[in-house]
Image (cartoon, rainbow, N blue to C red):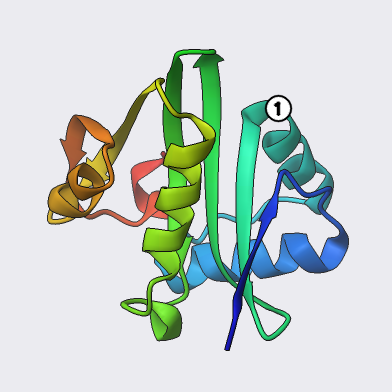
Amino acid sequence: MELTLRHNPVLDDADCEAILAIHAAVGWDRRMPPAELRTLYQHSGYSLLAERDGRLVGLLRAEEETPIRVWLAEIAVLPGAQSSGVGAALLRRFAEDHRGAYLFTDATLGTEAFFRRHGIHIQQVLEKTPRDQSGT
């Protein structure tokens, strides 16, 4: 089962539904219309979608604040695909594409070591709270 990474894809309706399904599967149950999700991804400046056997299994979205400062806004992997290298592949590609830049994120409590292993600086550590309850 080969993993394929799609860089800055133009999202179609199927992509949008798959992204929202991943959000829900990891506890980020925020629904938004496909047009709004497309706009979010287009204005972020950097995204990766991870596919295995034609199925979306992970995503990464970042905001390029400057050419040398990039914020990792979100990374998520379907629970059934976690611990299979999907998240590591996403972060590896992200770091390669931004070599020399300061990469940072807000990490959920317990994930700090994962990000640090991949050269991502932690801005703050957040409690595990579903996005639909926390408003973030």
Q: Which residue is mark 1?
A: 43
Residue 58 drawn at (x, y percent): 53, 66
Q: 14 or 57: nearer the eye?
A: 57
The residue under the point 40% across, 62% down is: 87
The residue under the point 52% across, 50% down is: 60
Q: 136 or 7: nearer the eye?
A: 7
Residue 18 drawn at (x, y percent): 68, 69
Amino acid type indicated by mark 1? His
Question: Image check: 123 left or right of 30?
Answer: left
Residue 135 drawn at (x, y percent): 41, 40
- Residue 64 vertical placement versus 120 (above, below): above
Residue 91 drawn at (x, y percent): 41, 50
Question: Image check: 15 left or right of 52?
Answer: right
- Residue 117 vertical placement versus 130 (above, below): above
Question: Image check: 102 left or right of 116?
Answer: right
Residue 125, by quadrant, is top left
The residue under the point 36% across, 51% down is: 133
* Mark 1 residue element: helix
Mark 1, Cα crowd under 10 Å, few <14 / some 14-19 / many 20+, is few
- Residue 94 vertical placement versus 79 (above, below): above
Quarter placement of the N terminus: bottom right
Quarter placement of the C terminus: top left
Question: Image check: 114 left or right of 8?
Answer: left
Q: 50 or 79: nearer the eye?
A: 50
How many labels, in total? Answer: 1
- Residue 29 vertical placement versus 56 (above, below): above
